[in-house]
Image: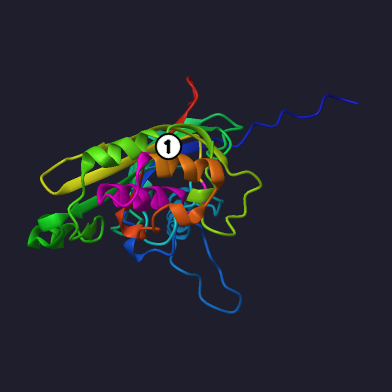
Amino acid sequence: MGEPPYTRAVPRFRLVIAYDGTEFHGWQRQDPPGKAPLRTVQGVLEDAVAEAVGARVPVTGASRTDAGVHAFGQVASFAAETRVPVERLALAINARLPDDVRVREAHPAHDGFDPISDCMSKCYRYSMAHGDRGTDGRVLFDRRTTWTTWHALDAVKMREAAAALVGTHDFAAFAQVNHGRESTVRTVFGCTITEPADGRLCVEVCGSGFLYNMVRIIAGTLAEAGRGKVTAADVRRALLEGDRTVTGPTLPPHGLRLEWVRYGAGTP
């Protein structure tokens, strides 16, 4: 018997994607039985990729963002034979996408690249307008991406509470009930509060991974700290005791944006 024929692996690609999540039912494709598919980012992206490369293939995303959540640096991957050169792949897909989704970059990836399991860290940003700026007319133009509150928030108190979140902890108190994960232990590499303009705050949380609604609950807890209703000691107690009643509300999805997803050195 002769040697088996050599089989060349189907080329794999890595995409960096931005989208306005307002009109989407989240990232993950949803096809309810007997009903029309819901509009999702994965759904419209798979449709556009199919047209661009001439074959329908699954597109896997690093983060399954919820309905209304945005992204600037979502990472996704697919494998397909295509005559489109990689340097023109983003343009080819974008020509077939709606205006609220854009492929920012396209790169070749190694055969086993998995945007979920290969992920080393992620960063989310939650944007807020507060105090007088919470009712300022200029927030009108940011209303899809910024949560507003008429309460004035103290950034110093928020930073004190944010510092208590950094490290490896059990984040059960910062997770939605029925989160579906076996372990609630996660590592937060950094939690920072910036003030990009008067009356504006951004909470950035970077970590190895996140529980369902974890960042939105962190943002709500830090907003309560900014009002003087939650202290750094309360945050530490919540982490130790897993008491959800100590932490703040789950803020609305529209203030949240996936900023970036990072992989190991040398990841193509």
On screen, residue 125 above or below 176: above
Left or right: where does residue 80 sit relative to residue 223?
A: right
Q: Position of residue 96 (x, y in %)?
A: 36, 56
According to the picture, the residue beneath numbered tag 1 turns out to be 165
Residue 70 visible here: no
On-image quarter of the N terminus = top right
Residue at the bottom extreme? 34
Left or right: where does residue 129 sit relative to residue 186?
A: left
Q: Magenta stretch: dominant SS?
A: helix
**Closer to the camera, 265 or 141?**
141
Residue type indicated by callout 1: Leu
**Closer to the camera, 111 or 243?**
243
**Magenta segment, which residues?**
211-232
Q: Position of residue 210 (x, y in %)?
A: 50, 44
Q: Position of residue 223 (x, y in %)?
A: 29, 51
Picture quadrant of residue 34: bottom right
Q: Residue at x 39, y 63 (%)?
A: 24
Picture quadrant of residue 204: top left
Q: Residue at x 47, y 69 (%)?
A: 38
Q: Classify mark 1: helix, strand or loop.
A: loop
Q: Position of residue 207 (x, y in %)?
A: 45, 35
**Closer to the camera, 31 or 262?**
262
Residue 231 covered by magenta stretch: yes
| Picture mark count | 1
